[in-house]
Each structure stands twice: as structure tokens, then as C-alpha cells.
Amino acid sequence: MSETGKRLEALGIELPVRDRKGKGVVDASIVGDVMYLSAQLPVDENGQPVYVGKVGADLDLDTAYKAARLCGLNALAVLKDYVGELDRVDHVIKVLGLVNSAGDFSSQPAVINGFSDLMVEVFGYRGQHARSAMGAYALPMNVPVVVEMIVKLR
């Protein structure tokens, strides 16, 4: 088992199984040693939203943090699906998180910490990244958060 796989096991994390059949839009694109992941949503293995609503109106910060963490679990599943072993991740370079925000909600970075904290838990220093966290008026399927990232591969 890979080192990152052992870390996932120690953290009690089981990644969702991905199904790429019949999709025109792909979850990731690899150019050289850089992988670009499409926006990941807080959805279950069937693609159904686990969390919905605007943060600051329908959902509190703690729940939105959990939604961002689920986006991270889905991103890890995509990485593993495309490259085989997560040890191939040299470094998480950049993360962009969009938060479906109520008009007066301004703690978008605290929401996206759910994703960022997971990357550091799983990859250690290799998971530290540059990041943007912004509010959005609306997101697909009324999910509270979406996150995309760029990763350097070994």
C-alpha cells in the first residue's frame, strides 16, 4: 500500500468510487506533469447533492465546512482514478473554492478550509497550496460549495 494510502487508512477515510462512463465533460485533464481537476461538488457516489442551500441562510459555517471537505474527498477520488496512486501527487499547487453565499455572508475562506485542511491531513506539506475562496450567487444543483484544484504530479 502507498504511503498516502496508509495515511488515508489511518485517518479512517474511504474514498468514493468514481464512474466516468458516458460523460462528455471529464473530471480532470493532465498536461505534462500538471493535473487540472474540474470543480468538485459535495455529492454522493450517485452524483446527488449531500448538502444544498446558501451558506449563512440555509446552512451554517460548520455544515458548509463539511460540504467543502466532501468536495475534497471527491477530488481525491478523481486523483486516484486518474493516476492510480495518490503518492503520484507531488504537490497541490492551487485551489479555487466558490461558496453559495447569502448576501451578508463573508466567511468564504473558513468554508474552504474544509477542503484545504483535508489536503494537508492527507498529503502533509505536499497538500499546502495557494488558494482563492470567493462567494457566488448560485451554484449547480444549489450546492453550498464547489472546489477545483491544480496538482503537480511525480
Image: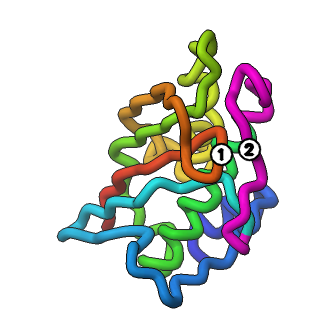
Q: Please check the rendered image and state whether residue 49 is part of the magenta-colored stretch, yes or no.
A: yes
Which residue is under mark 2? Answer: 52
Q: Does the residue at mark 2 contact the one at mark 1 (Cβ under 8 Å)?
A: yes
Q: Is residue 116 left or right of residue 151?
A: right
Q: Residue at x 74, y 24 (%)?
A: 61
Q: Please check the rendered image and state whether residue 88 is part of the magenta-colored stretch, yes or no.
A: no
Residue 48: x and y in percent read 72, 64
Image height of 101 relative to 79, above or below: above
Q: Amino acid at mark 2?
A: Val
State the mark number for residue 115. none
Q: Is residue 95 left or right of residue 5?
A: left
Q: Residue at x 41, y 62 (%)?
A: 89
Which residue is under mark 1? Answer: 143
Q: Is residue 102 left or right of residue 32?
A: right
Q: Residue at x 77, y 54 (%)?
A: 50
Furthest residue toward top? 104
- Label 2 crowd bin: few (<14), some (14–19), many (20+), radius 10 Å: many
Residue 15: x and y in percent read 69, 68
